[in-house]
Amino acid sequence: MNSTYRFLVGLIGLAAVELSATLFLVKSGAITSPSFGNATTMVLTLSTAIIFFFLQRTNPGQPLDFVRNFMLTLVLKIILGGCYVFVILRLDPAGANTNVAFFIVSYILFTAYEIAWFAIQKNAE
């Protein structure tokens, strides 16, 4: 299995584990259900996959280009994430705390997965 498929399988697995853990915590009464939980997971999964494909096409002979592109995607992800959170706050002000906390935890998980993947891949080259 090539690295693209492994990344995507891991990404989908991460999304499934996140949703399962959230469902478990909601059922056990530890947290309230985020009203935009599924949408947040889907948005972050798709954005992480798009970033992965964009960074995979970076010329491996130019590490500086990879770093620039990686930093660009992180900044764009932060800006667009802020816009997404703003929309969530406007649509569901009553569930703002739960939705924003879920977004922050999800954002950290997906970004950490992406960073770890590229760190391992680039160190192996």
Image (spheres, rainbow, N blue to C red):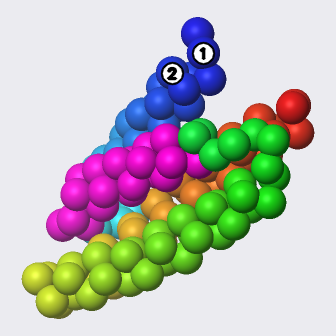
Disc 2 marks a residue whose amino acid type is: Tyr
Disc ID at residue 2:
1
Q: Nearer the viewer, residue 38 or 29?
A: 38
Which image quarter holds the N terminus?
top right
Instruction: Locate residue 30, reporting x and y percent.
Output: 40, 63
Residue on which the image places disc 2: 5
- Check disc 1 and report its element: helix, strand or loop: loop
- The vertical placement of 1 against 40, above or below, is above
Badge 2: residue crowd in 10 Å (few <14, some 14–19, many ≥20):
few
Horizontal and vertical percent position of residue 69: 62, 62
Q: Is residue 47 left or right of residue 117?
A: left
Q: Residue at x 69, y 66 (%)?
A: 68
- One can see residue 24 in this view: no
- Residues at badges 1 and 2 in contact (C-beta under 8 Å)? yes
| Residue stretch in magenta | 34-55
Q: Residue furthest top?
A: 1
* SS at mark 2 in the image: helix
Classify residue 116 as left or right of residue 105. right
Q: Is residue 25 left or right of residue 11?
A: left
Q: Residue at 35% x, 48% y: name it.
A: 46
Position of 55 relative to 69 (above/below) = above
- Residue ID at (39%, 68%): 102
Amino acid type, residue under disc 1 in the picture:
Asn
**Would you say the magenta stretch is mainly helix, strand or loop?**
helix
Q: CA distance from mark 1 to mark 2?
A: 6 Å
Image coords of residue 63 (percent x, y) = 81, 52
